[in-house]
Amino acid sequence: SVVIPCLNRAHFLIPTIESVLQQDYPNIECIVVDGGSTDGTQDILRRYGGKIKWVSEPDQGPPDAINKGWRMCNGEILTWLNADDPWAPGAVSKAVASFREHPSADVVYGDCGIIDGDEKCTCIACVREWDLAYAVQYCDHVIYQAASFIKRPILERVGWLYPKLLHDHELWLRISLSGGN
């Protein structure tokens, strides 16, 4: 299940939703949580009919919207994409395969393409293996949220995103500190 939080991002939303719907993995649930956009976002969402779920109402910012969406999800693997973060083809299949190869893993993540305003990939952010001590000491942001997938039980155990923080780094720390893999 993927949650897409948005607020007045209509010009980015279609490529992101399409990148989800065009994945080769058959069981994807897409939920868009709109904070009450006034830029045509709701018209775009209506066009998708039953292909996605969505809600449009004021929220307290992206972490609140993501948490709201996650609570609506039915999937056992959760993630989120910001409205301007499309997935590469095959991303979900690769993540699911990685979970199958490593059943004790709670989080899988990979390289992340950085795109410009014209949706052109400008570079690839290559990740390395997670190291808690290094992440704490250097506030190292090893995991790119757009290329991460999380098992629901670990999120339920450590709690969702903290609503007042706009950075996901602390989520990865909480998961690691709880004994998550």
Image (cartoon, grey):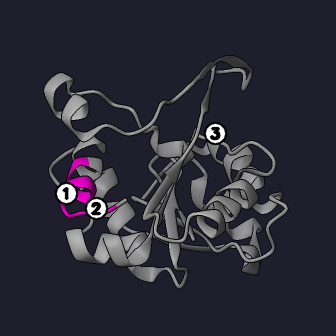
Disc 2 residue crowd, few under 14, some 14–19, many 20+, Cα 10 Å: many
CB-based contact (under 8 Å), mark 3 and mark 2: no
Name the outermost residue toward the bottom: 74
Q: Residue 51: image x %, image y %?
A: 75, 75
- Residue at horizontal 79%, vertical 51%? 90
- Residue 102 horizontal/vertical position (percent): 56, 64
Marks 2 and 1, the one that precedes in the sequence: 2
Measured along the vertical axis of the image, is residue 29 above or below residue 132?
below
Above or below 25: residue 49: below
Q: Which mark is residue 64?
A: 2
The answer to which of marks 1 and 3 sits earlier in the sequence is 3
Which quarter of the image is occupied by the C terminus? bottom left
Answer with left or right where residue 60 lies relative to residue 110. Answer: left
From the image, tell me which residue sits under label 1: 163
Residue at the (14%, 50%) spot, across then down: 164
* Majority secondary structure of magenta residues: helix
Q: CA distance from mark 3 to mark 2?
A: 20 Å
